[in-house]
Structure formats: C-alpha cells, structure tokens
Amino acid sequence: MKLINTLGLLLGAALAVQAPAQAQSYPNKPINLMVPYPAGGLSDIIARKINVPLAAELKQPVIIENLGGAGGAIAAQKVLNAPADGYYLFQGSPNELILAPLAMKAVKHKPDDFRLIQRMAMAPMAIVASKNFPGNTPQEMVAEIVKRAKAGKPVNYASVGIGSFYHLLGEEMAKKIGAEMLHVPYKGGGPITQDLMGGQIDLFITPYGAPHVHMAKEGKIKFIAALSPQPQRLIPDVPSIDQAKELKGFHYTIGSGYYVKKGTPEPVVEALHRALTKVMFDADFRNTMTAMGQEVGEALRLDQTEQVYADEVKLYQGIAKSIKLEAQ
C-alpha cells in the first residue's frame, strides 16, 4: 500500500511538472484556427488574412477550419471538446459565444467557457439588398416593408442563424418600423450572398467589406443604408440609416476577436496574445484590413480583455432581452 501511494505521488508530481513544461514549449505543432462559418464569407476572408502573419509570429502553421451551423455554436463546441492547450483558436464574435446560447436550447456552452485573447478589428455595418429590391434608400426600404407586410407578403431578411446579432437587428428593425418581416436563417455569409445575388433574399443586415462593395459596383447587389450617423469610407454615396425617421439612431458595428477555451495555461495565453498583438501592428495586415473596410483599433492589453468581454456579454444579453428573445 505504501508503494502504491508513493507511486501515485510521484506520478502526480510528474504530471504537475509536465503541464507547465508543455506550456513553456508552446507551440510545438500546427495550430487550428476555427472559423464558425463556411468558406467565402467575410469571417473566412479575415481569417485568411490573419493566418499567414500569425503563423510567422508563432513559427508554426496556422490551419483554417471552416465549420458552419447553429449560429456558430457547432464550431464553438468543437473547440470546447478539444484540450485547453491553445492548439484550437476560435475566431469569434458575440454571435457565436453570447447570443447563440440564448437563442437555441440545444446550445450548451456559456460565454464564460471562453477567454478573449485579443480584439483584432471592428467591422462597419450596412443593409444590403437584392438588386431587384424596389427600394434604393432607407425611406423607400421602410415604405416597401410596410406595403408588403400589409399585403401579407412580408419582406424577408437573412442572418447567419437564429439568435445571431443580425437576426436580432432584423427583429429590432421590424419592431421600430411596426411591420412584420420574415427571417431566413443560413449557416454563413457566403451562402447568403449567393442567394442575395440570385434574388431569393431581399435584405441582409451585415458587416461588409471590399468584396461587397465590388459586387455592388458590378450591379449584383446594392447598398440601402449605412448603420452609422454619417456616410462610411468605403461607401461614401450610401445614405445613413438616419434618413428613415423610424430607424434614426439604428447604428451598429461588430468586432471580431480570438478566443481560447477557458483554463488554457497562462504562458500559452500570453504567447498567443503577444503574437496576435504583433500581427495587429504589421503594416501589411493593417493595410489589407483597411482596404477591406475593417477598422483595426488599439490593441488590448491582456489585463483588459476580461473586462472588455464581460462588457460585451452584458450589452448583447441586454439587446436579446429588449426584443424578448426566447430559446427555441
């Protein structure tokens, strides 16, 4: 019995030494970057601008994995099913980590299952429409929504899933206008854009970038309104949503960040934070993101990330409560 106890103590001590040692040698193999939407959408495009400079900083390949569905919750759960060792990095936003658990009973993860490492960019938002949608301005859009609701044929709008930020904004917009709209959930922005160009979708409230601007210039889609009080840099001729009196003040942006499973060793978190912060200051990366319409802000210190994430949780849970979002 004494021998067994001694062996147990020795094994425990060996494991206790091994874990910090593994953390200190991080990374010693490729890192997976989980994108919770299919290839082709804005999230995927951003990931493919980050993975190369991030790999250079970490001196290991960063492999992108696209996994859509359930508003990003399937991808989030896959990260949580992996060890908390920093080899699964999650590219996310309030959509997947805060709102999905509030909207879907099947989603079991909670916001505090994840830890924010760094906030990389803020995306401007706009309302885009099918090229054949009758309205071209915020006022005309509102008039069309009201007209079709009265006729029993409501305008539809797409989102990346039930309970996503864009779903909530659609519900909030319909509430402000006082007319029914039909929500059509998808697995990601790529498929939405295809159906928007095909005319199956009327409206999409979304972050946007240079690819959307290019499609609009080609006449494949059109911008209706910028969700800001003034015109935006990439779309200076698109009017502010404030031009529709029903939607005055309907201003939103959304940020993308990088997260790990809670419980990841601190040396690993520090290594990832250093690498992501260096990428933020890389001139090529900043120029690329700016050209795409993304705003790269000030880097967060590691000791700021916890409060920033807690503030986001409070904000988005408040939005969900305001429209009486119920889990389905």
Image (spheres, rainbow, N blue to C red):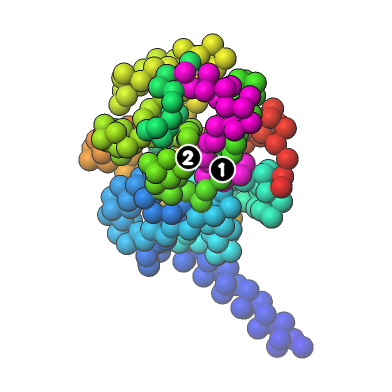
Q: Which mark is residue 124?
A: none
Image location of residue 287, percent across then percent down: 24, 35
Sequence-first disc among 1 and 2: 1
Residue at 52 percent of width and 40 percent of height: 158
Image location of residue 243, percent across then percent down: 46, 12
Q: Could you tell me if residue 258 is visible in this image? A: no
Q: Which residues are magenta?
A: 140-163
Q: Secondary structure at mark 1?
A: strand
Judging depth in this view, the residue of 151 and 288 nearest the camera is: 151
Residue identifier under label 1: 184
Residue at 71 percent of width and 86 percent of height: 4
Would residue 295 appear left or right of 321 to someone viewing this image?
left
Give neighbour class at mark 2: few <14, some 14-19, many 20+ (Cα, 10 Å): many
Residue 267 on the magenta span: no
Q: Residue furthest right?
A: 1
- Give the amino acid type for the residue marked by disc 1 in the picture: Val
Q: Report, in whole angstroms, how far the alpha carbon at label 1 lies from the one at label 2.
A: 8 Å
Give neighbour class at mark 1: few <14, some 14-19, many 20+ (Cα, 10 Å): some
In the rendered view, would you say 155 is above or below 4? above
Proximity of marks 1 and 2: CB atoms separated by less than 8 Å: yes
Q: Which mark is residue 201?
A: 2
Q: Could you tell me if residue 317 is visible in this image? A: yes
- Give the amino acid type for the residue marked by disc 2 in the picture: Ile
In the rendered view, would you say 194 is above or below 237? below
